Amino acid sequence: MVQFNFQAPWVPILNNCVSNELAATDNNPPFTTFQLATIDSKTGYPQNRTLIYRGWLFNNKSSNVITFTTDKRMEKYQELLDSDKVEAVFWFGHIRKQIRFRGKVRLLDSEHQPSIDLNHITSGEVTPIELDSNEDDSRARVQKQPVQTSLISPSFVENDNTQEDLSTYQYAPPTREEWQQELDRQWNGLSKALKTSFRKPDPKSPMTEDKAKLISKIQRGVDGKKEEDGYKNFAVGTIFVNYVDYYEQDKDKRFVYELDEESHTWTEEEVCP
């Protein structure tokens, strides 16, 4: 029996680690960071960087989808257009625990919305939602590929949040409107300073005198632009996790969680640390 709103066994672990680490640091800083590695298709080298953890997709931990934000002009955004495979690492230094996540990223922005395939939980056919893109088809193809997951429309979950057999219900993946609402929710959750960063010149472009002056004006809030002007460069990354490596350094224990793509269930195994 497949159930909707099913929480993966590693979700409480991440939640507890985040809460306990913030408590140990007295919420200073008041956020959680992690490392995200992508693949640069031009060089073949992995690219790694530190990001801020933005919580769960649709603000629902039972989505099992980790989110982060990015500027569409960043290298990682372009890399995710070519390859959706990533690894994310959370290290909680004060409580001495580490969690590594492997999965596929789907971008959410004005050009992209994740395409969700629910056919594995129904005898019928549910058409994944795709958004037309002006990008070159060869680059957009990876992000257009449907993700086979049990992610249900948030409105469906709100109407009936009991965990029952999906086969008796009329259900659907998130709608275009719901994806747009999630994009807006993530944007509105950013600080004013972070929203400002999306108005700056293209990241890693050569510094010029004009760009230096523009950055100074933006920092002082006298560039003549509104706060929402950076929205066009804003995107959300959603990590659909399929493998988790959890290490408790304080207890010298290690566990592996893996998603079976045929049965869509999670396995848990204790392994040597």
Image (tube, helix red, strand yellow):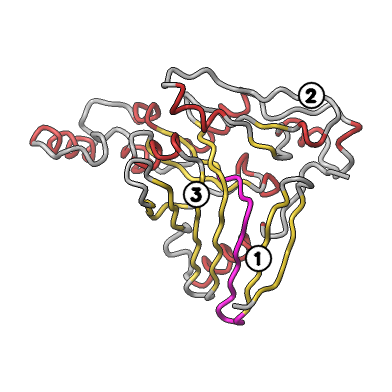
Q: Which amino acid, by three-letter code, is at mark 1?
A: Val
Q: Secondary structure at mark 1?
A: strand
Distance of label 2 from label 3 (alpha carbons) = 29 Å
Of residues 69 and 39, which is closer to you in this image?
A: 39
Q: Does the magenta segment cover residue 246?
A: yes
Q: Which amino acid, by three-letter code, is at mark 2?
A: Glu
Q: Which residue matches tag 2?
A: 125
- Residue 225 pos. (x, y %): 27, 26
Q: Secondary structure at mark 2?
A: loop
Are discs 1 and 3 less than 8 Å apart at CB? no
- Quarter of the rendering occupied by the C terminus: bottom right
- Please tell me which residue is depicted at 56% across the width and 56% down the height of the picture: 101
Q: Secondary structure at mark 3?
A: strand
Of labels 1 and 2, earlier in sequence is: 2
Q: Is residue 93 left or right of residue 210?
A: right
- Please tell me which residue is depicted at 79% across the width and 41% down the height of the picture: 4
Q: Is residue 217 left or right of residue 115?
A: left
Of residues 98 and 45, which is closer to you in this image?
A: 45
Q: Which amino acid, by three-letter code, is at mark 3?
A: Val
Name the mark on residue 86: 3
Q: In the figure, residue 50 lies in which quadrant? A: bottom left
Q: Which residue matches tag 1?
A: 256
Q: Is residue 22 left or right of residue 128?
A: left
Of labels 2 and 3, earlier in sequence is: 3
In the figure, 131 relative to 122: above or below? above
Q: Does the magenta segment cover residue 114?
A: no
Distance of label 1 from label 3 (alpha carbons) = 17 Å
Q: Which residues are magenta?
A: 239-252
Q: Residue furthest right?
A: 168
Q: Main secondary structure of the magenta part?
A: strand
